[in-house]
Amino acid sequence: MAILSLSQQVLALAWWLALGVSVLIYIALDGADLGAGIFSLFVRDHDERGAIMTAMAGTWDANETWLIVAGGILFGTFPFVYGSAFSYLMVPLAFVLWGIIARAIALEFRHLASPFWQRFSDGVFGLGSLTVTFFGGVCVGAVLQGYPQTDVEGRVPTYVGGAFTFLSPFSVWVGVASVVAVTLAGVLFVRARFEKGEPIRIDAAKWTMTIFYLAIAAVGITTLWSALIFPWAADKWFGAHFWIWGLLFVASVFAIARMRRATLDERDLAAILWFNTAAVIMGFGMLATMFPYLVPGTWTIFDAASPQVSILTFTMTMGGFVPVMILYNAYQIWVFRARVTKLAAHAH
């Protein structure tokens, strides 16, 4: 481990937490949009697909900003990881970027197009959502595996693998599991944003019943697989402090059960909040499992941190930005909280 001052260690930990919070907020907010986009691939009604876009038209761009915030934190606070990880994940991140751009174009220009191009935009929007979700999950699975890099004394380590080193059965599986989990978030979003008598909301409710169990299975398989192939995970989960992880497991199961009850009781907002609570518990549980690594087996938080002057400057410049973003998101969600119908399709 590099020799760091106490202030730098504290700042590195704080920005590591901020990075985790930014990623989790992005998953919670834009995950619902992405899942609704995936769900739209199976919606046959033209106006209903357009109404899904309308339901997120006022908030989707702010939701995606959290991904930029996470990238900015990584660049400003952990530049060594930024440089090596982006080389490692160049191919899947290129697909993620394509998907984000495609979704944005479809959302912005659908209402200006002819009926044919509106249908084309619908397909681009759905496929873009699927692409972002799948390859974003692949990136997460690949990061958990770590990656090879140089180890030359006096030089900054650099990535030495190939363009497709990220590919493995586990990383592909995490991509699939991400699609399942995000689709559940999407149908919960559709249920919450459409009037209760709308046919699309009824269809989303039917989807919820199936996707719920698929998501439970996906989480279980991912957890078990992680315990089998990652010693750093198994050592913590089943080590001397196993009871801590047991409490987190119980808390996540409780949140999932409450989410399920809320969906059955037609309490749509509560269902989304409990779903995100479960996701946050599991997300912070994984961060704690990885600690002190930022990339397991490759970079620790402290080895990857910027020199002290840089991290102090970054903190003074950007430290107040995160709470402003949170307030901005909360304001947008409040303003666009009303339910919609298919008559509000993003073409009328």
Image: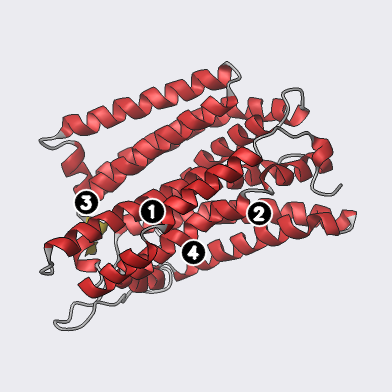
Which amino acid is tagged 3?
Phe
Taking the image as shown, residue 210 lies to the left or right of residue 273, namely: right
At horizontal 74% and vertical 39% (from top left) the residue drawn is 43
Q: CA distance from mark 2 to mark 4?
A: 15 Å
Question: Which residue is label 4 attached to?
Answer: 92
Neighbourhood count class around disc 2 (C-alpha, 10 Å): few under 14, some 14–19, many 20 upward: many
Q: Are marks 3 and 1 in contact (CB under 8 Å)?
A: no
Residue 127 image label: 2
Q: Is disc 1 placed on a helix, strand or loop? A: helix
Taking the image as shown, residue 260 lies to the left or right of residue 193, namely: left
At horizontal 36% and vertical 59% (from top left) the residue drawn is 319
Which amino acid is tagged 2?
Leu
Q: Are marks 3 and 4 in contact (CB under 8 Å)?
A: no
Mark earlier in primary sequence (3, 1): 1
Mark earlier in primary sequence (2, 4): 4
Which amino acid is tagged 1?
Gly
Question: Which residue is label 1 attached to?
Answer: 141
Q: Is disc 2 placed on a helix, strand or loop? A: helix
Q: Is disc 4 placed on a helix, strand or loop? A: helix
* Looking at the image, residue 238 lies above or below residue 86: above
Q: CA distance from mark 1 to mark 4?
A: 11 Å
* Residue 318 place in picture, x, y as percent: 38, 63
Residue 291 image label: 3
Neighbourhood count class around disc 1 (C-alpha, 10 Å): few under 14, some 14–19, many 20 upward: many
Neighbourhood count class around disc 4 (C-alpha, 10 Å): few under 14, some 14–19, many 20 upward: many
Mark earlier in primary sequence (1, 2): 2
Q: Does residue 297 show up? A: no
